[in-house]
Image: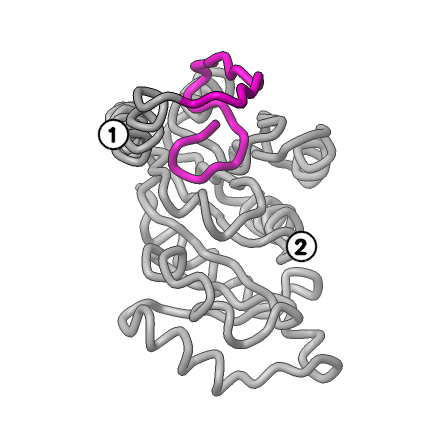
Amino acid sequence: MCGTCGCGKTTSHDRQGHDHHHHHQHDHAEANRAAARPRQWVELEAAVLAKNDSLAQRNREWLDRRGLTAFNFVSSPGSGKTTLLERLARELARRRQLYVVQGDQATNRDAERVRAAGAKAVQINTGTGCHLDAEMVAGALDELDPPAGSLVAIENVGNLVCPALFDLGEHARVALMSVPEGADKPLKYPYMFRSASLVVLNKLDLLPYVDFDPAEFRAALAAVHPQVECLQLSATRGDGVDALTRWLEARSP
């Protein structure tokens, strides 16, 4: 089980057997071992994150050598990450190629969608895993082999908890949320929003039809990350997407 999030994912592809046999007699040694487990889990978590951070730095150096900037798009499921990447692929088509590392638990659907919009994409299926890690991204980057001048986007698995812990080698993290999710989302998932380089509020076209208070959202975001920039847009209609393309290109070679 993933020591950092309890998601059921075997971390960094290391698989350990689990004995599910239960015995009615427990001696003092067994009790002592049980008492020691919390410390073991903490040590495991530290080791997992340290290994991942080392691999993430290698990814960043690999990108830097090629003059590339990578953006890690994170959100809960259904916030519109794939729709936004489709829009970005079309908007950027005249200026540069978009290369996408697509993360999902199952299917190739999202990679097919962004390819149809003009992007190059590699799909990573994590199975029971709830986030991408640096090792997975390294393999996808090798396969994509993006040339200098292109823009690299990583669409993480839809989840606002576990992806916040894992550096993938990106240069910036873009946290996406949509108006149907509620204005208090930054308060409920503070670490994700606190670690974001940019926050994007999507689905503005639905604002007249849902109970969403923009002022409450801005206050919630300011409470966890006062300095972060926030862009508002509709990936479906295209409103405000030009501001996002300018933000991405300003941070790309």
Residue at coordinates 37% horizontally, 34% vertically from top-left? 168
Q: Which residue is mark 1?
A: 43
Residue at coordinates 59% horizontally, 47% vertically from top-left? 85
Task: Name the image quarter holding the C terminus.
Answer: top left
> At which x and y percent is residue 180?
66, 71
- The quarter of the picture where residue 213 lies is bottom right
> At which x and y percent is residue 181?
62, 68
> What secondary structure is found at the residue carrying circle 1?
helix
Picture layout, residue 88 above or below residue 70: below
Residue 201 or residue 40, whichever sits in front: 40
Residue 48 or residue 250, whichever sits in front: 48
Give the label, 2 or 1, closer to the camera: 1
**2 or 1: tag closer to the N-terminus:** 1
Which kind of residue does numbered mark 2 sit on?
Answer: Gly
> What secondary structure is found at the residue carrying circle 2?
loop
Picture layout, residue 157 above or below residue 223: above
Residue at coordinates 72% horizontally, 32% vertically from top-left? 112
Q: Is residue 167 magenta?
A: no
Asked if the residue under mark 1 is in contact with the one under mark 2, i.e. CB atoms within 8 Å, the reply is: no
Circle number at residue 78 = 2
